[in-house]
Image (cartoon, helix red, strand yellow):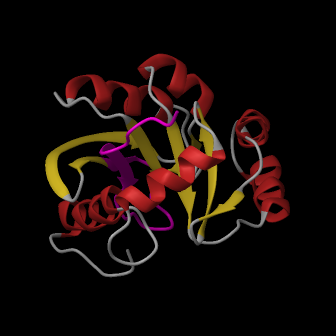
Amino acid sequence: MTRPFRNFMGFDDGPFGHDWRGDVALVAITCVGDRLDGVATSSIRRDGRNSTQKIADLCAAAGTNPRVLLLQGIAVGGFNVVDIHELHKRVKRPVLVVARKEPNLKRIKRVLLHNVPGGRRKWSLIERAGPMEPAGGVFVQRAGLSLREARQILAASTFHGSLPEPLRLAHLIAGAYVTGRSRGGA
């Protein structure tokens, strides 16, 4: 028996400059089917370690009841890596990480271990999340759901392009929130 998936919460960070070292906007979008049902904002530290807690806080404060959390990549605000298994445990909801293309893990590991404070811990979170798996024209990592369910979620939430609608909207709204207007590319 499969679970019905219609209520999704997607997260994306706002744009920031290469040299920026402060907080970065974090936007959460709730969609029920193809309807935008809620928007919430917070901030996370650039290259910090507070993304898991901030996302859990946004889920609790949003006033909606998402069935699945969607992340556009496992890190927000540069290398503020989300512990997807801890997030799943805290919010008691499946977590699905979506990436358009398979990341270059060798390069990411090198950057984390040599250039980012706390890089070893962050790399271990990426390893613990498991390999990126192809599904529905994108790559995914997951906590609390099967690959079959991940494919169902992608099919139920993707209407324009290759990204689920909550992630597409979160990207557009985060851009407008930070810069005053949204950009394409979502």
Residue at point 85%, 61% (across, down): 106
Q: Nearer the viewer, residue 28 or 152?
A: 152
Residue under the point 46% across and 73% down: 162
Magenta residue check for 22: yes
Residue 76 x %, y %: 49, 50
Specify the segment rendered in magenta: 1-26
Q: Is residue 83 visible?
A: no
Residue 102 in the magenta stretch? The answer is no
Q: Residue at x 37, y 65 (%)?
A: 15
Q: Nearer the viewer, residue 53 or 149?
A: 149
Quick check: 3 above or below 8? above
**Image point (64%, 72%), residue name:** 101
| Vertical side of 121 occupied by 30: above or below | below
Quarter holding residue 61: top left
From the viewer's side, name the closer residue of 44 and 131: 131
The percent position of residue 142, horizontal first and vertical second, equals 61, 42
> Outermost residue, bottom direction?
184
Q: Is residue 90 visible?
A: yes
Counting from the top left corner in percent of width and height, residue 20 is at: 44, 58
83 is higher (above) or lower (below) than 46: above
Of residues 145 and 72, the one drawn nearer to the viewer in this rendering: 145
